[in-house]
Amino acid sequence: MFVISESAWSAMFLGAAFKSIAVLCAAWLMALALRKRSAASRHLVWTAAAAALVALPLLSISLPALRVPTGGLLAAAPSITFHADANASGGGPAPRTAAPAARHAAPAPSAPWRLDLALCLMLLWTAGAAVALAQMLLAYTKLCRIRRAARPYPAPEATRSLGRSLGIGRTVEVLETSAGTMPMAFGLRRSTILMPAGAQAWTEERRRMVLLHELAHVRRADGATHLLARVALSLFWWNPLAWSAWRQFLKERERAADDLVLTAGEPAADYAGHLLEVARSLQFAPAASVAVAMARRSDLEGRLLAILDSAADRTHPGRASAFLAALVAIALVAPLAALRAQDPIDPKAPDVAVTFRTAIAQKAIAQKNYGVLDQAAQDLVKLRQYESAQKLLESSLAIREEVSGKQSASYAEGLLKLGDLAAKHGQAGPAEDYYSRAIALGDTPETVPALLFLANRALGVKNFQQAEALAQRALTVSQSGSLAARALLLKGNISLAQDLAGMAENYYLQALGAVKPGSTDSAFVMETYAQLMRKQSRLGEADGMSDSAATLRKAHIAELAPRHTMAATPSRVGNGVTAPVLVSKIEPEYSEEARVAKIQGTVVLSIVIGVDGHAYDATLARSIGFGLDEQALDAVMQWQFKPGAQNGLPVPVIAQIEVNFRLL
């Protein structure tokens, strides 16, 4: 399934916003350059801009990215708080896992909800566009109903004659609607002019001029371009430039239609008088927002002045010009839509690492040295080059089979390594296959993570008997220590899934006794046990156990984080110290413990960004446990920054990292 992470959606929306501003600014410059040309020419500019805005989101998604180096300037705003996101499926196998030994935890409520400004803005944009498009669709439907209920307008021969005078060869349908409504042209494939009832009481000259104006819209295909511009406005409703462009579009369209009427030979003064009277006496219906009405009072004064200006340029491009302008605009905006900011090359150079390890692997295959292949694959996993690592492990397995046979412990070890990689890469099906083949060759301490993985899979489909058997096998083989604690924890989860809370609690207590005090495994057991306590409304006990687990997590993060002796004391942004800029980052992976326990929330790390642009001295400011704190640290330690500076020299700066973990 195609999934785009929240950070990718944020980048897409932000890119569309900036690109729309660029398109509209270019349209304004073009319109200003053509200010002494005809209104029809300027209307072409605004039509082309509308086409570009409508095409922009579609092209941004469909076109391959055109990467442009930015030196990190667009990678992140100069802020002292940086953000990252990790997403995982809430049910079934995780897209990514932390370690195969980390297994099922008791179901628990998610962490407290926190306002995400970027997500709120995206939702607001989407909701506004949906409402605007829905209003447009309703108005169009209403006008279709009005057209079906309308009566034929008298004197069709006169209408055909006027149409031919404007170069319209086909017959244009003219219908009569309710009294007092503004004349308008409507329709895409079938153009229709809607005249108000009572128009027969007008003078013949007024009827002729009104019909000429609406026929001018038909000739110009203004019904189609009106809907195009309306869609563009709906998509970018939040942009003041879009509203300004919409007003200019309407103004130039009406003036272009006026120019057609005048070039057909109608006297300017008489036409202006009739236009003024129509605008005063008739009403603009809300449903007409998707039609081309004759007169809007907001721009009437400017139109009248333009009509009476004998020096005005009234030249008019052909009808196909609007469509050609739209196509040209889409072609021109395509490179802009494909434009992406490209982060500088990661100094770790993973591609070079892959090439180097591939060369080593080829030599190891020739020498039938699977140990070298296993080590190279392990290094590639650290770089998250999972596909390349899998190829090396498959070659290692083939060598193990050739050297020791399919029934050997060496072959089982190769299967376990492939299973571990598949589980880490979120490929639960292949992982289950590799693990099943491995445990079929016998139970050893090395197979315990595989047994726990398969037991979790069985628990997920409510095959309690198989899950219990596999968990018991894991407990029997491990007997004590961390793996035994995880087996006991899993047996507790199996009991809890069968509504045996008392038995589950007994297993959790045994797991606490099996783990090493002060270890991250004991923190995991306490976090799981605390969730059970909360379900039983033992909130005081749960909070105390969660606090103890958080203390252990903070100590562990402090041990894992790189320490760096710096010549200068780390500074805070302000007083002449500029903020670091995020140049490149990787998103954290979801831990298996947290995914199956349905844990989500925000991990907050306080770090020092050194003068070399790397993160040091991380401390855990907010913990959510279940392995997510460690996953956040692992990702952040691989980020690259442009360091902060003071008086033009790089200095270490204290920064905060917020890592959001969410279940989809």
Image (cartoon, rainbow, N blue to C red):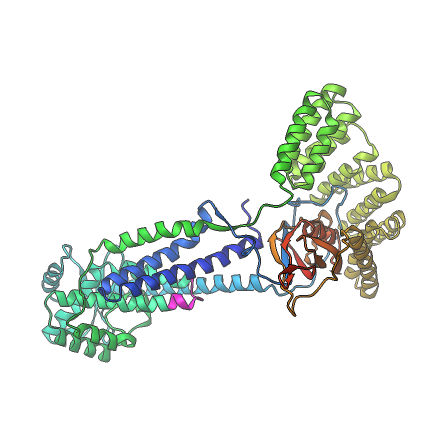
Position in image of residue 429 (x %, y %): 65, 37
Residue 202 higher or lower than 427, as above or below:
below
Left or right of 422: which side holds 47? left
Q: Does residue 11 appear in the picture of this structure?
A: yes
Position in image of residue 246 (x %, y %): 34, 66
Left or right of 554: which side holds 26? left
Q: Does residue 153 appear in the picture of this structure?
A: no
Q: Nearer the viewer, residue 584 or 275?
A: 584
Q: Residue at x 11, y 76 (%)?
A: 203
Q: Quadrant of residue 412?
A: top right
Q: Which residues are magenta?
A: 236-243
Position in image of residue 238 (x %, y %): 45, 66
Query: Looking at the image, how many numbered discs can be counted on the residues?
Result: 0
Q: Residue at x 75, y 45 (%)?
A: 103
The magenta stretch spans residue 453: no
Left or right of 35: which side holds 90? right
Residue 451 higher or lower than 599, as above or below:
above
Q: Nearer the viewer, residue 662 or 20?
A: 20
Position in image of residue 627 (x %, y %): 74, 51
Q: Quadrant of residue 357?
A: top right
Left or right of 228: which side holds 606? right
Looking at the figure, which quarter contains the N terminus?
A: top right
Q: Residue at x 22, y 64 (%)?
A: 37
Q: Quadrant of residue 74?
A: bottom right
